[in-house]
Image (spheres, rainbow, N blue to C red):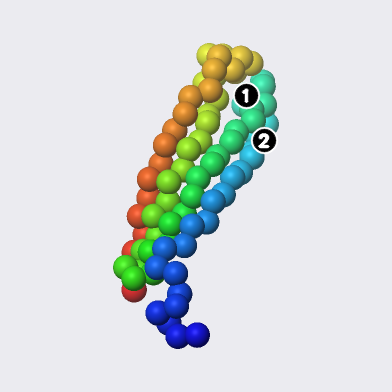
């Protein structure tokens, strides 16, 4: 196979779960991340889109809610 047979865009989905239990906070939290990497072969670049949820503590022992966070990242390599 020659190089032109290679896909121009490759997709790599990902997910992560994190359990955090800090000494300074009285309640542990569960956090989730979901996203995808898009590898753009012709441009030597990677584009990442990620959604994360993070806890909102009203006191050190109380998680009032979770708020979403959206990240967009571009990496160019030579």
The residue drawn where x is 42% and y is 51% is 48
How dense is the environment of label 1, judged by Cα within 10 Å: few (below 14), some, or many (20 and up)? some
Q: Residue at x 51, y 36 (%)?
A: 52
| Above or below: residue 57 compared with residue 38 | above
Q: In which quarter of the image is residue 18?
A: top right
64 sits to left or right of 28 = left
The residue to which callout 1 is attached is 25
Which image quarter: residue 4? bottom left
Depicted 62 relative to depicted 66: above or below: above
**Number of numbered discs on residues:** 2
Give the residue drawn at x 48%, y 24%.
67
What is the quadrant of the C terminus in the image? bottom left
Residue name at image x 67 percent, y 26 percent: 28
Q: Nearer the viewer, residue 28 or 73?
A: 73
Numbered circle sitting on residue 5? none
Find residue 13 and report its horizontal and vertical position in percent. Answer: 54, 51
The answer to whether any part of residue 22 appears in the image is: no
Q: Residue 19 carries which label?
A: 2
Question: Where does the image place residue 7, in percent across and percent down from the top left?
Answer: 44, 69
Query: Residue 42, image x and y in percent?
Result: 34, 71
Q: Residue furthest left?
A: 43
Kind of element beneath mark 1:
loop
In the visual, does 53 lie left or right of 73?
right
Q: In this view, does 29 lie to the left or right of 13?
A: right
- Asked whether 61 or 76 is in front, the reply is 76
Q: What element carries label 2?
A: strand
Q: Position of residue 5 (x, y in %)?
A: 44, 78
Q: Earlier in the sequence, mark 2 or mark 1?
A: 2
């Amino acid at each position: 196979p020659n190089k032109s047979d290679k896909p121009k865009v490759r997709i790599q989905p990902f997910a992560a779960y994190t359990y955090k239990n800090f000494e300074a906070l009285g309640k542990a939290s569960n956090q989730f991340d979901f996203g995808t990497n898009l590898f753009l072969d012709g441009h030597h670049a990677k584009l990442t889109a990620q959604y994360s949820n993070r806890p909102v503590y009203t006191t050190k022992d109380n998680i009032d809610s979770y708020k979403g966070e959206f990240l967009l990242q571009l990496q160019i390599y030579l």
